[in-house]
Image: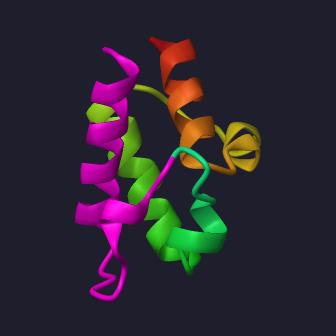
């Protein structure tokens, strides 16, 4: 999967998993901070993480989640797992 394909799929997952009508998903970039800018609570974080694991067929352990700060970090992580 290319970086663009991973990025597009990740944005779909985030948009589907979060109930944030005021969030402008078109402004999400590689530098967007997941927990600061997008995910506001732990339940939403769990939904996004589970959806990522399901869609990309990967497992994300708790230590790895701590290192995933930005959209770019998640994409790099997914590319490394591919």
Q: Position of residue 17 (x, y in %)?
A: 30, 65
Query: Closer to the camera, 29 or 10?
Result: 29
Q: Residue at x 31, y 14 (%)?
A: 1
Q: Is residue 32 left or right of residue 15?
A: right
Residue 21 counted in the magenta span: yes
Q: Residue at x 61, y 50 (%)?
A: 31
Residue 6's place in the image compared with 81, above or below, is: below
How many circles with numbers are drawn on the protein?
0
Q: Position of residue 15 (x, y in %)?
A: 28, 63
* Chain part drawn in magenta: 1-29
Q: Is residue 32 left or right of residue 36?
A: left
Query: Closer to the camera, 10 or 58?
Result: 10
Residue 65 counted in the magenta span: no
Q: Position of residue 57 (x, y in %)?
A: 34, 25
Instruction: Report the coloring of the rendering.
Output: rainbow
Q: Residue at x 63, y 59 (%)?
A: 33
* Outermost bottom residue: 22
Q: Where is the C terminus found, in terms of image quarters? A: top left
Residue 35's place in the image compared with 80, above or below, is: below
Q: Is residue 21 left or right of residue 30?
A: left
Q: Main secondary structure of the magenta part?
A: helix
């Amino acid at each position: 999967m290319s970086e663009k394909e991973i990025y597009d799929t990740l944005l779909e997952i985030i948009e589907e998993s979060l109930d944030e009508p005021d969030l402008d998903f078109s402004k999400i970039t590689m530098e967007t901070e997941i927990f600061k800018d997008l995910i506001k609570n732990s339940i939403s974080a769990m939904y996004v993480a589970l959806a990522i694991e399901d869609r990309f067929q990967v497992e994300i352990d708790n230590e790895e989640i701590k290192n995933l700060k930005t959209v770019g970090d998640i994409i790099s992580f997914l590319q490394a797992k591919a």
